[in-house]
Amino acid sequence: MKKLILLVFTAFFSLCALAQKDNKVTIGTIDSIQSKILNEQRKIWVYVPNSWTADSKQRYPVVYLLDGDDHFNSVVSMIQYLSQAGGNTICPEMIVVGIPNTDRIRDLTPTHVNAAPPYTDSLMLKTTGGGERFVSFIEKELIPRIDSLYPTQPYKILTGHSFGGLTVMNVAINHTKLFNSYICIDPSMWWDQMNLLNTTKKALREKNFSGTTLYLGIANTLREGMDITNVRSDTSKGTRHIRAILNLDQYIKEEKQNGLRYESKYYSNDDHGSVSLITEYDALRFIFDRYRFKLSPKDYTDSTVDVANKFVKHYQEVSKLLSYKISPPEDIVNNLGCDFLEQKQYAKAQGLFKINVANYPESYNVQDSYGDYFLAMGDKSKAIEYFKKALAIKENAVSRKKLNALLSEK
């Protein structure tokens, strides 16, 4: 099927996906779950990629987002952009599950404290230390519910900022295999006299973190006149937040034998409040650094290059990275095949159409495009075969017109 038609329909349906009732643009739905573990009703914000339909068999990795009411919109928009960057996608499309807060200091602190400056109100600290129950809620209630209702893949990411970052580190260290990757944003590692920081140091020495990825973003919370070198020797309460994070970063980098895939960055131009967005962006680029598929100018112009094989090998490597099978994207492969067909690079076009038919046999569009290839090669019987396959999957005017034209010639 002609690429222009595909692009027109893609643009049309994209606009339809954004046009919601009452002329409002929405990016997700509000779900809820009655938690027996937390003994309360929890609202959950869920975004499912627009590419999913009720008839689709496509499934997606899942990002679980702490402080969901604060970060849901920005993270969803970022993933939408990075997964649709002009066809040269940087990360896969993903489901985003935002977890809004009810009692934030209860859920996002792993230990109970009676005093934790700057929190001087004892009533505020009364419920602290509910972190393990909150993790249990995520593991035993939330994840199973999301997996039962939404088109999920097994690959999961947990991301959190501040106290949420503290929770991310607690899960990464004590419940490592619950998620595949962790995004930890300026975490409150100072909590409870750096109790979790000390536990983390021990775990980094003794545990195996192979198959786990962690990205740490560090904000500039330095006092005037300090830098990230001289602050390490400071002892004032005002710098304990960044000192604890810098210590965490140092501990992780020193224990290279534990198999953890790790990267960190200090954001000198961002403070504790502004660092989330840029950290999320850099973290996704790091986690999926091998996801992006690139073709060289020679791949486009040299008719002897086996482009289809490059696609296959690349996505085999990506599948290993994410631990589930990922096929080359149908639309990208189909568009490129159509380009090569127009350029009369027939071997390259056929290779791409063949892998699309193998990966997406229930797509009428890939069957139709393969029919176009055989038509261009003068193999009318094969062209008829594939146009019929396309029409058997879905009646459409374009395939019907081509089939009728071929049958009228007999």
Image: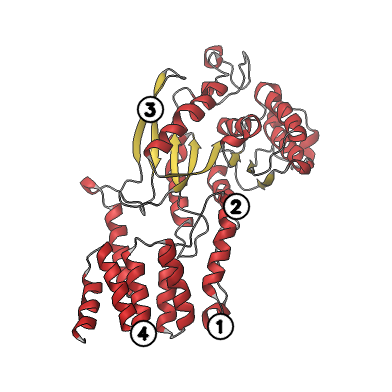
Where is residue 94? Give x, y as percent: 45, 48
> What residue is pinned by disc 1?
304
Query: Residue 282, relative to residue 121: is it above or below?
Result: below
Q: CA distance from mark 2 to mark 3?
A: 32 Å
Callout 4–callout 1 Cβ contact below 8 Å? no
Which secondary structure lies at badge 1? loop
Q: CA distance from mark 4 to mark 2?
A: 38 Å
Query: Could you say where residue 314 lies in the image, as x and y percent from the top left?
Result: 57, 63
Give the residue number, with chain letter if any, for mark 3. Answer: 33
Residue at screen point 76% across, 32% down: 206
Q: Identity of the amino acid at label 2?
A: Leu
Residue drawn at x 48%, y 33% as measured from the top left: 67
Residue 107 as seen in the image, left or right of residue 72: right
**Residue that label 2 marks:** 321
Specify the quadrant of the image occupied by residue 16. Answer: bottom left
**Residue in view at x 36 percent, y 68 percent:** 366
CA separation, marks 3 and 4?
55 Å
SS of the residue under disc 3 = strand
Q: Is residue 115 visible?
A: yes
Mark whose residue sits in front, 3 or 4: 4
Q: Nearer the viewer, residue 181 or 347?
A: 347
Residue position for label 4: 376
Residue kind at label 3, given as amino acid type: Ile
Q: Secondary structure at mark 4?
A: helix
Q: Earlier in the sequence, mark 3 or mark 4?
A: 3
Q: How is the image coloured?
A: secondary structure
- Alpha-carbon distance for marks 1 and 3? 56 Å
Q: Position of residue 386 (x, y in %)?
A: 32, 72
Q: CA distance from mark 4 to mark 1?
A: 19 Å
Quadrant location, the C terminus:
bottom left
- Please indicate whether residue 217 sits to the left or right of residue 331 in the image: right
